[in-house]
Amino acid sequence: MAAAMASRGMQVTGVDVNSSTVDAINSNRAPVVEPELAEYIAANHGRLRATTDFQEAVRASGLTFIIVPTPSDEAGGFSIRYAAQAAREIGRALRAKKDYHLVALTSTVLPGATEFGILPLIEEESGKKCGRDFGVCYNPEFIALGSVIHDLLHPDFVLIGEHDERAGTELESWYKSFTLNSATVMRMNLVNAELVKISINTFVTMKITFANMLAAVCEELPGADVDAVSKAIGHDSRIGRKYLTGGLGYGGPCFPRDNKALSSMATALGAPAALAEATDRMNHLLLNRQAQRIEELLKPGMTVGLLGLAYKPNTNVVEESQGLMLAQKLADAGHVVAVYDPLAMENAHVVLKDSVQYMNSALECLRSADVVVIAQPCEEFRSLRAADFPVHKQRVLVFDCWRVLASELRDCSWVQYVAVGVGRDDQARARRVEAQRAGAL
């Protein structure tokens, strides 16, 4: 976010308690893996600097964004302890500042956190009054790892929860100089904006899970194809095509916990949240189903090569990754598992440790495997060709969770190709369909 701001000609001071992150920024290096980030930092080095000193950063700026972790608590909600710490530091810095200052909380929080948690701390530490001496907004970003810079500069919309009109107006004005696509700005009170943030992520998880449920149904219907079905469904303007591709379930640092947080909050308020709870359960059930399907195809002594350990392409994040959990389940069941991911090997090793074998490339993983699981639709795996799969006495079994190699492998003589979400034409499934049809007559 700081790099994107600097790219728009703004002077940006980043603050972090981690000195290695600060040193990386000031040394013109990207502290995390994200496409285009290193280039943006290098290109805007004169406008971007970092420090561990809150006072220095607040004094040098007129707008401060709080972007800190809000870890899940035991009940499934969000802790604001780091945001509270940042708010106190900002408040202390504002005590000696005469000019109006705008503070925008970006971290995902539960409704009420900004107004009753963050705002009072800034007032307490600064000795000043919100709305008169400084402003407070809730302003979450809707971004996806792997495309963060693009998403920041080209948002679908800008969400501003405002304590008062002045704060909202100033933040809206700032966004007009920041975004590149003249995005619509939605302004509302703080609690509504906080609810919008977790509601969007929860709705998306429901849509992903619905597509995965469709994939499971299609697998049991000879001739059925989840891509054909979801493509048609997506043409309905009430539904849309985004996030409607059946495959493995959702993961990452946001979707799973936001869904649980909405459910936790609703339960605490005495409101039913069965839909969010069912989405979470289904996400785990469908993963177990795919693990079971793979195990049914395995024979003793077979090695499974699994491609894709990050929770999505173009990132090294493995938190709640379905591919990583699939590798763990197969290894725990006693199978030999060889794994490869273009970005996430180091992070995956922290979780999987020595339970799997780590390969240096996708091709090395293919050469070592009797069964190949494509758990992520990244470009490297999409680019594989039939000739990359070794010819054995027994055909190599390829279990493609995203159907990225369907056209390449469907008719390959030395590969047994199984696609998630595509019905297999076997006698047992045909008999079940016939029995159901007969019962409906």
Image (cartoon, grey):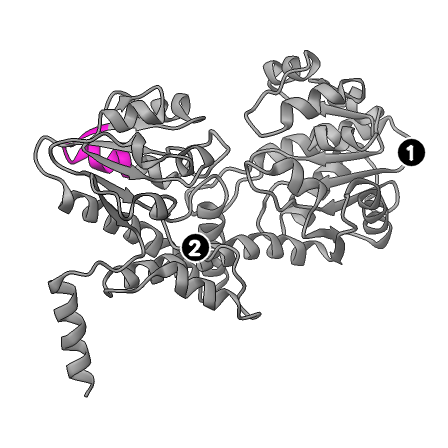
Instruction: Give the side of residue 34 with respect to residue 289, left or right.
Output: right
Residue 273 x %, y %: 44, 63
Q: Quadrant of the N terminus?
A: top right
User: Which residue matches tag 1?
Assistant: 99
Q: Residues within 10 Å of mark 1 (few under 14, many from 20)?
A: few
From the viewer's side, name the closer residue of 330 and 359. Answer: 359
Rendering coords of residue 207 (x, y %): 46, 59
Q: Is residue 191 magenta?
A: no
Residue at x 69% of width, y 48% of height: 155
Segment colored magenta: 326-337
Tell me if residue 51 comes above or below residue 234 in the rendering: above
Secondary-structure class at tag 2: loop
The answer to which image quadrant residue 22 occupies is: top right
Q: Is residue 271 visible?
A: no
Q: Residues within 10 Å of mark 2 (few under 14, many from 20)?
A: many
What numbered label is drawn on residue 245? 2
Query: Which secondary structure lies at badge 1?
Result: loop
Q: In the rendering, at what x and y percent does residue 64 appear?
A: 76, 34
Residue type pointed to by label 2? Thr
